[in-house]
Image (cartoon, helix red, strand yellow):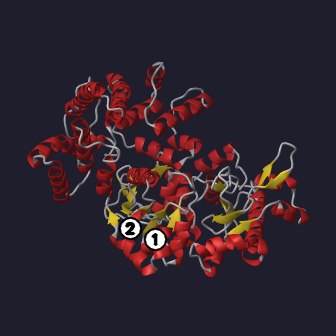
């Protein structure tokens, strides 16, 4: 879709009511100044989805989603920003050129996008033909069948083969395809003389398709043992392909995912394909990179639960940890980890076992997030060393404190006590401050309960913060950013701190975007949040902006609090980093058997850990 001029975007937004956009998806009822309904992005019994008609924004107090009318459509219908603008345009009474508007079937496709889709469709057909119908593709076809794939699966996934030479380029030359279109397709590598050459040569090709089934990229696996070449070569990003947003096999898996309300996240393409052939048709994989927020958001709109089945090696375990943390932060999907027996990956297991056995593994060889995190915390730790053992116990208690059910929490505590021959009562005493801290962060039913805190302490009453699972640093960042956007004096006070920066990337990103936005608007406070959301566009950032609107206005009255928030951000975040660095230094000293340094670092570690615990208890 062609780019819509900014002035038209603003005009459309100003002439449409967000209530009219949301109402077809959510039954809204007036409660006070806002309208409330059940969130369309997750199941809930008590409505927590709020629409502020005055500010033209929405926010879910449960899952954290938020934004303006455009953001809502982008989330609910998986649209791009231009597509959302074009869809809302008819409601606003603003006329757009036909290239922006939707027809009876769908939004009009940009001509260049359409041409590239046709190009990739032709390339996919040619590569698949070379694999299954030519002598040059026999080696590649033998490789795939040796991996257990049958003819039907190879056809379903439109697997292909790219031979040596420039067969794809020569084919498009005979079709007289425009040179500039070929350049933009990223199907070719451009040499210094401007000539184009096939990107893939002597490789099995996995076709990557978007959620509607259009081929948009390839991943090529080498067939030779040449160590000078990477095992896989992937298409770079293009007008069609955004690797942070796409998921392999989502086009084939999405209906099953929606029906079962569950998705399985695999590490590799072959794992997904082998599982699909075995009847497990709700599996997807990310694009060779770590799982992203965009990918989690896409899955959370289809499913309630997710199983992570990554490789059992160290790289796979680290990837599992990253994915699990990201899924937990999003708060929508219930997660579990699948362990394939004998340290095999799913593809390997299926080559030596039948589909029934594999399905039994998916059901029974599962681990909950707490158990995984406790096991993961032990990796690379010498638990025979007292300092490292105490550090592990401290970290383990932090994990156990996240368990909401008292009975289950008690079970984990008893396991920890038995494993290290510790007193259960002592562990209960040590975890109690963590539980009290989490209890204090929970929202109160009365937004005005509790005494105001002294001005020298930052006001962190949990009922005044929309998200209850934020750390102290994140809470300070949330309130301070909201204050800066609405108050020029606070903006100047913070920006005059030469060394100040937000510790969490999303807040620092919003801070930098706000600086650019203010420059374009004569350094005026950002009071029109819906307009600023248009400027930001990214859903993960507009959610944060929407959450800022839920902060109690009383928190913006005492200017002495600004300095308190700055101190929390500047002082406590480095303390966390110091603990992590000392832990790394202790591990290194252990590896070198430097006992004197171990003793010195252990004293420092315990001192800093005590400082952290003191700060938590005092606040």
Residue 278 horizontal/vertical position (percent): 50, 78
Vertical comparison of 143 with 449: above or below: below
Q: Is residue 294 visible?
A: yes
Vertical comparison of 282 with 192: above or below: below
Pointer 2 and pointer 1: residues touching (CB < 8 Å)? yes
N-term mark: 2 or 1? 2
The one nearer the camera, 260 or 86, is 260
**Quarter of the image with the C terminus in it:** top left
Residue at 46% over, 32% down:
486
The one nearer the camera, 299 or 17, is 299
Residue 5 horizontal/vertical position (percent): 70, 46
For disc 2, the marked residue is: 341
For disc 1, the marked residue is: 349
Helix, strand or loop at mark 2: helix
Residue at 59% over, 74% down:
146
Helix, strand or loop at mark 1: helix
Left or right? Give the position of 314 relative to 405: right
The label on residue 483 is none
Residue at 89% over, 62% down:
173
Q: Mark 1: few, some, or many residues within 10 Å (few <14, many ≥20)?
A: many
Left or right? Give the position of 27 relative to 99: left
**Quarter of the image with the N terminus in it:** bottom right
Left or right? Give the position of 438 relative to 283: left
Residue 6 horizontal/vertical position (percent): 67, 44
């Amino acid at each position: 879709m062609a780019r819509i001029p900014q002035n038209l975007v603003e005009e459309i937004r100003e002439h449409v009511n967000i209530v009219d956009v949301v109402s077809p998806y959510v039954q809204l009822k007036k409660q006070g100044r806002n309208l409330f309904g059940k969130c369309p992005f997750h199941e809930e019994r008590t409505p927590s989805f709020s629409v502020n008609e005055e500010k033209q924004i929405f926010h879910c107090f449960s899952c954290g989603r938020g934004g303006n009318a455009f953001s809502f459509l982008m989330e609910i219908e998986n649209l791009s920003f231009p597509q959302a603008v074009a869809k809302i345009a008819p409601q606003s009474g603003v006329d757009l050129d036909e290239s922006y508007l939707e027809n009876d079937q769908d939004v009009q496709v940009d001509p260049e996008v359409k041409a590239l889709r046709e190009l990739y469709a032709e390339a996919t057909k040619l590569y698949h033909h070379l694999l299954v119908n030519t002598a040059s593709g026999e080696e590649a076809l033998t490789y795939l069948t040796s991996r257990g794939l049958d003819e039907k699966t190879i056809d379903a996934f439109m697997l292909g083969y790219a031979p040596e030479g420039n067969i794809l380029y020569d084919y498009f030359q005979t079709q007289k395809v425009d040179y500039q279109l070929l350049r933009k397709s990223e199907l070719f590598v451009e040499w210094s003389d401007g000539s184009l050459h096939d990107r893939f040569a002597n490789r099995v090709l996995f076709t990557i398709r978007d959620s509607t089934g259009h081929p948009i990229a390839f991943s090529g696996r080498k067939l030779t043992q040449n160590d000078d070449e990477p095992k896989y070569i992937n298409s770079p990003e293009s007008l069609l392909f955004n690797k942070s947003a796409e998921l392999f096999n989502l086009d084939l898996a999405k209906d099953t995912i929606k029906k079962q309300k569950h998705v399985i996240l695999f590490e590799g393409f072959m794992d997904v394909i082998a599982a699909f052939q075995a009847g497990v048709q709700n599996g997807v994989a990310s694009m060779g990179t770590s799982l992203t927020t965009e990918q989690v958001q896409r899955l959370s709109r289809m499913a309630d639960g997710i199983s992570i089945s990554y490789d059992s090696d160290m790289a796979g375990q680290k990837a599992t940890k990253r994915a699990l943390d990201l899924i937990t932060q999003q708060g929508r999907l219930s997660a579990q980890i699948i362990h394939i027996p004998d340290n095999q990956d799913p593809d390997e297991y299926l080559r030596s076992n039948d589909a029934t056995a594999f399905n039994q593994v998916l059901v029974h060889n599962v681990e909950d997030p707490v158990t995984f995190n406790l096991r993961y915390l032990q990796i690379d730790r010498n638990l025979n060393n007292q300092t490292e053992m105490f550090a592990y116990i401290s970290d383990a208690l932090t994990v156990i404190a996240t368990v909401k059910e008292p009975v289950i929490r008690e079970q984990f505590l008893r396991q920890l006590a038995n494993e290290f021959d510790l007193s259960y009562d002592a562990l209960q005493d040590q975890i109690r401050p963590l539980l009290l801290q989490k209890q204090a962060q929970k929202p109160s039913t009365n937004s005005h309960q509790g005494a105001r805190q002294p001005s020298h302490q930052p006001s962190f009453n949990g009922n005044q913060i929309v998200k209850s699972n934020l750390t102290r640093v994140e809470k300070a960042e949330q309130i301070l950013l909201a204050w800066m956007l609405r108050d020029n004096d606070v903006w100047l006070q913070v920006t005059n701190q030469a060394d100040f920066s937000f510790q969490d990337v999303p807040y620092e990103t919003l801070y930098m975007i706000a600086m650019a936005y203010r420059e374009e608007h004569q350094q005026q406070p950002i009071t029109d949040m819906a307009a600023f959301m248009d400027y930001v566009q990214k859903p993960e950032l507009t959610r944060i902006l929407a959450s800022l609107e839920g902060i109690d206005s009383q928190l913006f009255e005492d200017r002495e609090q600004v300095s308190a928030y700055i101190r929390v951000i500047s002082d406590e975040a480095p303390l966390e980093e110091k603990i992590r660095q000392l832990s790394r230094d202790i591990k290194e000293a252990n590896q070198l058997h430097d006992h004197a340094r171990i003793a010195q670092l252990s004293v420092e570690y315990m001192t800093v850990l005590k400082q952290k615990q003191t700060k938590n208890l005092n606040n």
